[in-house]
Every structure is written in C-alpha cells, then in structure tokens.
Image: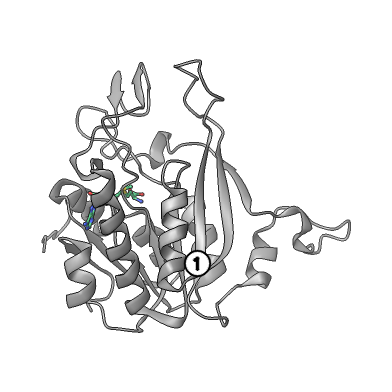
C-alpha cells in the first residue's frame, strides 16, 4: 500500500486490492449512516448554510443493501488489521445495532463505546422525541493483545493531583463533550458553506489515535471524507492511508493535508 496517501475509489475494492492482509494497526471508520433523505432538515443551521439538508447520494440505501455493504467493509477491515489491531466505528442510534451485530458476527470483540456528546447539537425540531445530542464510536478489537496507551491518556487528562501529577483515569471516561466542527476547523467552500456535512472533530480522532496506536503505526480510514484522520495521524507521527469515493471530498482532503502547492491528484 502507499503510505501517507489518499486513494480515490471504493473502499470495498481498494481494501482488497491495495492494502495488505494483517498490515494495519488501527482503522478509524466513519461510514455512511443511512440517514439521508429522511431527517435532519433544518432552516438557518449555520454549520451547513442557510438551508442544510443531509441528503448525500452515498448515504442513501435500501436497508438490506446497507446490511450487505456494512458486512462487506467490516469483513475487509478484519482482513487488513493486524492481530493486535483495533477498529473504531462512528455511528448513531440509527445504525449502532447493525454495526455491533455484524462486527461481532465477523469475530470482533467490543471493548468500549465512546459517547460523543455534542455541545452544540441541533435543536429539537419535531418536538416528538428527546433532543438528539450524541454520536458513538464503537471500539472493536481482533485479538486480546490490543494497544491501549494508558500512560499517554493520563497525560491528556486535564485533571491533576494537588502536586501537579497525572491522575488515575477515574474521571477520564468513555464520554467526550465536543461541539460539532465549526469555526476555523470547518472546511468551507467558496460559497462559505461547509464542504462536507459530517466532518469529524480533530479532538475525537486524536483521542482514538493516541489510545490505540503508537508512533509509526499504520492508521487506515476507509471513509476519508475531508481527511480528518490523515491530518491528526500525521501530527501524531503515525503513518496513514485514506480511501474516499467522492472526488470533491478527495480533493478537499488532499488540499487540507498537502496544501495547494504542487498538488497532483491521484
Ligand atoms: C461520514 S463521511 C466521513 C467524514 C470524515 N470522517 C471527515 O471527518 O471528514 C463518509 C465518507 O465516506 C465516503 N464513502 C461512501 N462510500 C464509500 C466507499 N464505498 N468507499 C470509500 N468512501 C466512501 C463518502 O463520500 C463520505 O465522504
């Protein structure tokens, strides 16, 4: 596989063709949630523009096809991961049941579910359910010798003892409060609107990469989007590989990571 590289294409095909078996330390996957065209219509949402609707072609599935697709990419992830590897999958209440069921069927063990509480969640438009403010990241492992960098996480923990030393992680939980990406971190197009509807916060990806990989580890993101995983992995001195199907997002990720100068796509 090419390291520190974005592949343009379908991860189902490319994970089989380009990524060697048992070669990857960590996969962070933010797959389609199968949400589009159904919900999340909001007028005056500043993140997506004056009228923002989650209506992406890549996110519209028949339920049966979604199950088949999910099983295929999780099985490919199993193949390319080392026996010590971890697979983190972002999801919401819409697809968490399917993700966990399928991953377990393939052989993965579920270690944790990280809850991301969105501090600027969308308001309750329908007034018919509790306000949705959370997404999840399921952490799966292949074997029982997974990487968990407890000491590094202790350093990340903002809480200190009276003497200024790092603390036991009693107050550093499988729960993280972060806003939906906004401000400078949000990639915007010339029209001022967000380039991608589901760009993930760098802080969330940082937590995952620090916890479950080491310097020079290989981190794969098969649904690369705007390249958040690549940016964070490079900053943390990990090797990374991204796969993205959509050419517009691929170009945005490329520009975000490599800058404008001397850009060659492909
Ligand atoms: C939820 S978004 C990922 C967003 C990303 N985490 C970020 O921070 O920007 C999912 C991405 O997967 C891409 N995608 C969908 N199906 C794919 C496939 N079969 N192979 C590769 N990428 C795919 C979509 O184009 C979309 O950009």
- The one nearer the camera, 91 or 26, is 91
Residue 167 placement: quadrant: bottom right
> Residue 203, how many percent across, how many down?
51, 51
Image height of 84 relative to 108, above or below:
below
Image height of 203 relative to 144, above or below:
above
Residue 147 placement: quadrant: bottom right
In the rendered image, the quadrant that contains the C terminus is bottom left
Residue with the most extreme right position: 162
Q: Which residue is mark 1?
A: 140
Image height of 258 relative to 142, above or below:
above
> In the rendered picture of this protein, how many numbered marks are placed on residues?
1
- The one nearer the camera, 228 or 124, is 124
Instruction: Please tell me how crowded label 1 is: few (under 14), some (14-19), or many (20+) other residues with Cα within 10 Å.
Output: many
SS state under label 1: strand
In the rendered image, the quadrant that contains the N terminus is bottom left
Residue 116 in view: yes
Residue 130 placement: quadrant: top right
Beta carbon at label 1 within 8 Å of ligand 1: no
Q: Is residue 201 left or right of residue 8?
A: right
> Residue 241, how many percent across, how many down?
29, 69
> Residue 168, how many percent across, how many down?
79, 64
In the image, what residue occupies the spot 15% across and 60% down? 8
Residue 221 in view: no
Q: Is residue 7 left or right of residue 218?
A: left
Image height of 41 relative to 165, above or below:
above
Snapshot colouring? one colour
In the image, what residue occupies the spot 46% across and 43% down? 92
In the image, what residue occupies the spot 85% across and 58% down? 161
> Residue 68, how many percent across, how many down?
26, 58
Q: Is residue 60 left or right of residue 75?
A: left
């Amino acid at each position: 596989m090419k390291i520190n590289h974005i592949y343009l294409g379908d991860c189902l095909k490319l994970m089989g063709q380009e990524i060697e078996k048992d070669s990857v330390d960590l996969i962070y996957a933010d797959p389609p949630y199968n949400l589009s065209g159904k919900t999340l219509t909001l007028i005056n949402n500043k993140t997506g523009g004056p009228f923002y609707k989650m209506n992406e072609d890549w996110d519209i599935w028949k339920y049966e096809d979604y199950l088949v697709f999910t099983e295929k990419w999780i099985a490919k992830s199993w193949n390319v991961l080392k026996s010590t590897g971890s697979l983190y999958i972002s999801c919401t209440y819409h697809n968490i049941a399917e993700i966990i069921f399928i991953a377990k069927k393939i052989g993965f063990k579920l270690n944790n579910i990280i809850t991301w509480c969105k501090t600027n969640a969308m308001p309750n438009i329908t007034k018919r359910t509790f306000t949705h403010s959370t997404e999840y990241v399921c952490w799966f492992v292949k074997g029982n010798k997974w990487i968990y960098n407890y000491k590094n996480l202790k350093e990340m923990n903002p809480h200190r003892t009276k003497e200024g030393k790092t603390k036991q992680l009693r107050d550093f939980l499988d729960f993280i409060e972060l806003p939906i990406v906004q401000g400078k971190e949000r990639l915007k197009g010339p029209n001022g609107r967000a380039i991608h509807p589901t760009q993930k916060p760098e802080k969330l990806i940082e937590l995952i990469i620090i916890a479950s990989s080491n310097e020079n580890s290989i981190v794969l993101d098969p649904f690369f989007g705007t390249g958040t995983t690549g940016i964070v992995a490079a900053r943390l001195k990990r090797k990374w590989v991204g796969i993205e199907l959509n050419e517009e997002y691929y170009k945005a990720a490329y520009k975000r990571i490599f800058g404008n100068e001397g850009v060659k796509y492909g």
